[in-house]
Amino acid sequence: MRVTVLNERRIPPHLGKPTPPVGTPVRVTGAQSLVRSLEAVGAEVVFGIPGGTILPAY
């Protein structure tokens, strides 16, 4: 499954990842969206059980 997300804000510069301008549609997977959300809130550790449909997130 792919999701189109509008970048409503840029990832903070200290994360060092380039982002397109605000409002530009970007095609991302659910796993990519999850990781971006965790990065945006400053999560450093995530626990989970790998396998099945969650595997792309790892």
Image (cartoon, grey):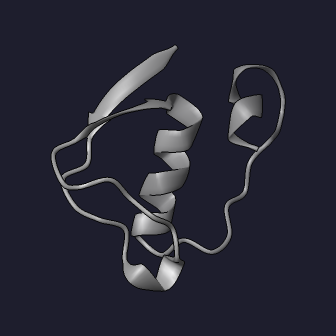
Residue at image coords 83%, 37%: 50
Give the vertical position of 51 relative to 20 (above or below). Answer: above
- Which residue is at the front of the view, 34 or 48? 34
Q: Where is residue 48 in the image (x, y as percent from the top left)?
A: 74, 48
Give the vertical position of 58 relative to 15 (above or below). Answer: above
Q: Position of residue 23 (x, y in %)?
A: 15, 45
Say which quarter of the image contains residue 41: bottom left
- Quarter holding the C terminus is top right
Q: Position of residue 37 (x, y in %)?
A: 42, 55
Please state if 21 lies on the left or on the right of 33 as rendered.
left
Please state if 17 lies on the left or on the right of 13 as rendered.
right
- Which residue is at the front of the view, 29 or 17? 17
Say which quarter of the image contains residue 46: bottom right
Residue at image coords 37%, 68%: 11
Q: Position of residue 31 (x, y in %)?
A: 58, 36
Residue at image coords 84%, 28%: 51
